[in-house]
Image: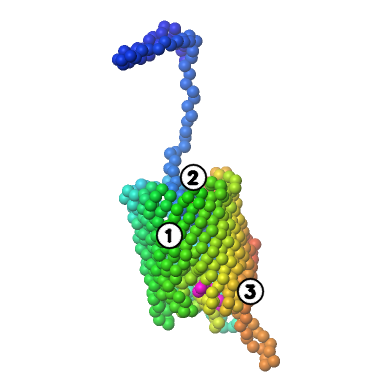
């Protein structure tokens, strides 16, 4: 760069001073104060080196919702014959949005004749509309018992769309699915078992449609979310269930720190089987007032509910208190809370058969009356990247369902209820360490102590559940994940040959299931921006445990395949 001469500096100084002098003359009483001008002969004008940013424009993630998010590994666990731990792991902080090219298709093959496919097809993020398609299929032509006699498959297609009209979002969802299972929990020592697996077949058909409208503006004083839906379910035999439902959530801010909240659910079920048709109406409204006083958050309200079921002649109309107090001991680090509550909980065959697909015919389904319930807990972030949560709950439940083996056919299960109330003590603890999305390690543990009065055991509800999970991003190409979960033994009912003075008789007895210890591993390796391979394994300890009595799960089962992103 050339040096600027002495005369050039004089000219620049004169030009800079001229407008200041003219401005001073225009203002009454204005004058130019004396100043000293320093002229440097040897100065070199040198601009600093500009920082270049090669990153693409970053779109900020949406505002974090107040509702808790259930964490899981997408596509992580192969179904172990419907063992569904339902691990209720931590609420995870809002993660970055997926790339704009977030669509993908996956395909894989595994042992037990397993075929896997998945497609995620959605439009790129748009401020006017969002729509997409989700498809998944997983089937095994063979299983742990007599090959084809324990086959299974699940297929699901989901469509969703949402249009944005300023602060209002109008959307719709449609989910359809088909699932096939076999009743393979039979005694293989008994002759004359069916050779045709179709004689053991159970098939479920599901459909769920919903339209909704919600408020997108987080700053609006009135927040709302209203949805109207219809669920349909049927099985291989004569059972059908139609569920028309409405759900809404609303909140209106009265002042800077207080608001009125009104939530509600309405459901009308028509359940049909070989015995006849049963109508099951349900309605529940939960009004409350919430206020924040410095570090103290208080919510006072009630849950008013009505259910049409009459199992065990329970009260159909229930009113429960809904009081919650939270205190922030340390901002963003330690929160303690306690509450008194209760509510009706809707129970449907649509949901029950996702937990246990081996239900017998003609089940009496009842809504659970949960309450009164007392709970206390805390949420904590003691150090950066570490989250700790714990909660203790004591509840008094009526018509809490359990799964017990059918008396005439132990390969099937009945819904059974305690004739009196069931007291439940729940202790829940969880921890998560998350280091910049590179390394994640979590622990979750639950104790569920059921005090049943007229049932011999809390059938197929284990007391202890634990899960240790972790993931590690080993560079930009390799991602690893692992999970080890355990369940304590629970109980079912079966038959044993008992020797009596009159001879050998077949006697119905309570039998324990085996405890569950299951290790799962997953790995993804990316060859390029669009192409990657994956491998995952389930039950790598090769324990043929039984979560449901008489139904051992598969041994080691692995799956490997290819993912294409576009």
Quadrant in the picture for residue 484: bottom right
Q: Is residue 83 visible?
A: no
Identify which residue, 224 or 354, lies in the foreground: 224
Q: Nearer the viewer, mark 2 or mark 3?
A: 3
Task: Tell me where the magenta segment starts and ends, as one range.
Answer: 398-405
Residue occupied by mark 1: 288
Relative image position of residue 419 (x, y in whole percent): 53, 78
Q: Gap between marks 3 and 1, in whole Å?
A: 44 Å
Query: What residue is shown at x 39% (from left), y 52% (from top)?
Result: 253
Relative to 546, is 279 on the left or the right?
left
**Secondary structure under the numbered disc 3 in the rendered image:** strand
Residue occupied by mark 3: 512
Q: Is residue 148 above or below residue 40?
A: below
Q: Gap between marks 2 and 3, in whole Å?
A: 50 Å
**Secondary structure under the numbered disc 2 in the rendered image:** loop
Q: Which label was assigned to residue 529?
A: 2
Query: What residue is shown at x 49% (from left), y 25% (from top)?
Result: 49
Circle 1 crowding by C-alpha within 10 Å: few under 14, some 14–19, many from 20: some
Identify the coloring.
rainbow
Relative image position of residue 224 (x, y in whole percent): 37, 56
């Amino acid at each position: 760069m050339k040096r600027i001469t002495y005369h050039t500096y004089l000219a620049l100084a004169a030009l800079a001073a001229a407008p200041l002098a003219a401005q001073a003359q225009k203002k009454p009483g204005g004058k130019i104060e004396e100043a000293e001008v320093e002229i440097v002969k040897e100065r070199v004008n040198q601009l600093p080196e500009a920082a270049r940013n090669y990153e693409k424009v970053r779109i900020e993630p949406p505002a974090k919702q107040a509702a808790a998010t259930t964490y899981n590994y997408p596509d992580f666990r192969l179904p172990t014959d419907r063992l569904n731990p339902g691990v209720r792991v931590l609420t995870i902080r809002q993660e970055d949005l997926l790339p704009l090219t977030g669509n993908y298709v996956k395909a894989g093959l595994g042992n037990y004749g397993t075929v896997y496919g998945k497609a995620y097809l959605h439009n790129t993020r748009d401020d006017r509309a969002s729509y997409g398609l989700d498809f998944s299929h997983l089937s095994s032509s063979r299983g742990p018992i007599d090959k084809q006699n324990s086959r299974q498959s699940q297929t699901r297609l989901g469509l969703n769309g949402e249009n944005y009209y300023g602060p209002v979002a109008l959307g719709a969802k449609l989910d359809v699915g088909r699932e096939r299972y076999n009743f393979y929990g039979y005694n293989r020592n008994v002759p004359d078992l069916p050779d045709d697996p179709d004689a053991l077949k159970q098939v479920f058909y599901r459909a769920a449609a919903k339209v909704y409208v919600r408020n997108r503006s987080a700053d609006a004083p009135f927040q709302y979310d209203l949805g109207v839906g219809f669920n349909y379910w049927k099985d291989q035999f004569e059972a059908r269930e139609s569920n028309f439902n409405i759900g809404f959530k609303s909140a209106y801010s009265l002042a800077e720190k207080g608001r009125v909240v009104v939530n509600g659910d309405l459901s009308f079920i028509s359940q049909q089987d070989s015995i006849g048709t049963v109508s099951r109406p349900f309605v529940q409204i939960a009004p409350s007032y919430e206020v924040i006083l410095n570090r103290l958050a208080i919510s006072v309200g009630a849950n008013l509910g009505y259910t049409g079921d009459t199992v065990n002649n329970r009260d159909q109309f229930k009113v429960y208190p809904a009081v919650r107090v939270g205190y922030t001991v340390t901002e963003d680090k330690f929160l303690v809370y306690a509450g008194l509550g209760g509510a009706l909980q809707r129970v449907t065959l649509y949901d029950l058969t996702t937990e246990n697909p081996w239900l017998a015919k003609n089940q009496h389904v009842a809504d659970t009356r949960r309450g009164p319930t007392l709970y206390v807990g805390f949420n904590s972030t003691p150090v950066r990247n570490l989250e700790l949560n714990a909660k203790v709950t004591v509840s008094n439940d009526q018509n809490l369902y359990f799964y017990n083996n059918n008396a005439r056919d132990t390969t099937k299960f009945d819904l059974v209820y305690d004739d009196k109330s069931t007291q439940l003590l729940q202790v829940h603890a969880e921890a998560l360490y998350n280091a910049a999305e590179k390394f994640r390690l979590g622990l979750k543990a639950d104790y569920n102590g059921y005090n049943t009065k007229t049932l011999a055991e809390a059938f197929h509800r284990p007391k202890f559940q634990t899960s240790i999970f972790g993931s590690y991003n080993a560079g930009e190409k390799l991602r690893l994940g692992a999970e080890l979960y355990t369940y304590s033994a629970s109980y079912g009912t079966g038959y044993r040959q008992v020797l009596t003075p009159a001879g050998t008789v077949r006697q119905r007895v309570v039998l324990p299931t085996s405890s569950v210890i299951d290790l799962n591993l997953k790995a993804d390796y990316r060859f390029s921006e669009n192409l990657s391979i994956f491998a995952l394994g389930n039950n790598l300890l090769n324990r043929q445990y039984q979560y449901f009595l008489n139904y051992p799960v598969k041994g080691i089962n692995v799956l490997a395949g290819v993912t294409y992103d576009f």
